[in-house]
Amino acid sequence: MPSYQVNRALTQAHYGGGEFAEVLAVAAQITPGDNESFHQAWFRMGSQVYDRAEQYAAAGHQVSARRTYLRAFNYLRTSEFFLVPSDTRKLPAYLKCRDAFIKAIDRFDQRPLQVDVPFDGSFLPGYLFAPAGIQNPPLMIMFGGLDSLAEELYFGISQHLNERGIALLAMDGPGQGAALRLNHILTRYDFNVAGTAVLDWVIANLGEHVDTSRVGIGAVSMGGYMAARCAAFEPRFKVCMIFGAVWSYYDIWKSRPDNHPLAEIVKHIVGAETMADARERLKLFSLDGVADKITMPTYVLHGEDDRQNVVENAYKVRDALTCEHVVEIIPKEESGSAHCCIDDFTKTFSMYDWIAARL
């Protein structure tokens, strides 16, 4: 899995999330299977790049600062990835990476709007990335996966949607990003409650920025379950984008060992003390009896060589859908067939074109 994260940074480098030479330098310092060396290598590089960004900012070189803060964010985010929630370094690493991202967007030509959606006695934070020069564009609301960060969706997804005239509201949902790390909101099987809350807030508050009658829902990785759940119980969404299908999150975890690199994180996001308890809670995270309730056009993109969510998940979703749908499977012989096309984002183009045609 660490090699997957290196590949991820290389792909995101095309969108400002890295520099090939820096990523390869980090990779050379990682001992396979050693998460401590993984954290230290990424944090060291992230901190060096962050310091360089600060120097550019102090000198008034705003373009250089912006690009450098973006790389620092992504390296520091990666350094936090495998740290268990009880590690005292996890929150400081997260806060530093988030600080880098906010300093970067402060220097965008068109600054994204930061939003806080009231939820569960607290709020879900997010960012509105709008296409330049377009009045009232359609909107995709998107969540990430597992405990991922809304900021990650900038690298690729926001840019591809914006190029097609579509705004992106990238959200930290329950169990994700700042909603989890700062607001202590755990994930939930009925993720549609969060999806509807965000849609209601968009309709009430973003009418001057987007066309609130043309709003779709999407998510990535574990978010493949979340997007489908939101779509099934919120018919006001106009399209659904499932970027990496998940049929049952319990099925994904039932055979994984208790010492899996992400086991502590899974326990944390569901509020469990043991993996046995976590697996029991994950039994509710299933699309059985849910997927067939989706009524809006739906696009499913999945890699045949996905090692995290095996391709059978996509086939199960395909067989259950009764709405208009496209299920695109990237063959394992091609680049882009890994988890969420992390090895080739160009394989997502047809998905974005399809969304643009319907929004």
Image (cartoon, grey):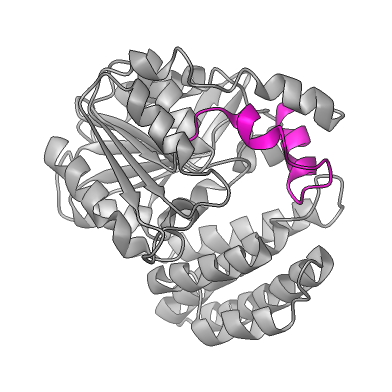
The residue positioned 62% from the left and 36% from the top of the image is 252
Q: Position of residue 279 (x, y in %)?
A: 74, 26
Q: Is residue 183 left or right of residue 267?
A: left
Residue 19 lies, in percent from the top left, at 50, 81
Decide which of 139, 84 is in the foreground and name it: 84
**Image x and y of residue 189, in percent:** 58, 20
Residue 182 seen by the camera: no
User: On the image, which quarter does residue 120 sit in?
Assistant: top right
Q: Which residues are magenta?
A: 246-270
Q: How many marks?
A: 0
Residue 232 pos. (x, y %): 38, 17
Which of the image's four quarters has the C terminus?
Answer: top left
In the rendered image, which quarter is residue 299 located in?
top left
Is residue 122 rendered to the left or right of residue 155?
A: right
| Image quarter in which the N terminus is found | bottom right
Q: Residue at x 63, y 60 (%)?
A: 77
Q: Is residue 102 left or right of residue 85?
A: left
Residue at point 28% right, 23% down? Answer: 237
Say left or right for 335 vs 192.
Answer: left
Q: Is residue 260 magenta?
A: yes
Q: Nearer the viewer, residue 86 or 59?
A: 86
Asked if one can make out residue 107 in the rendered structure from this viewpoint, the answer is: yes
- Residue 116's place in the image compared with 46, above or below, is above
Q: Which one is nearer the viewer's eye here, 41 or 330?
A: 330
In the image, is residue 18 above or below residue 257?
A: below
> Residue at image x 76%, y 51%?
261
The answer to whether 160 is drawn above or below residue 355 in the figure is below
Residue 62 falls inside the magenta stretch: no
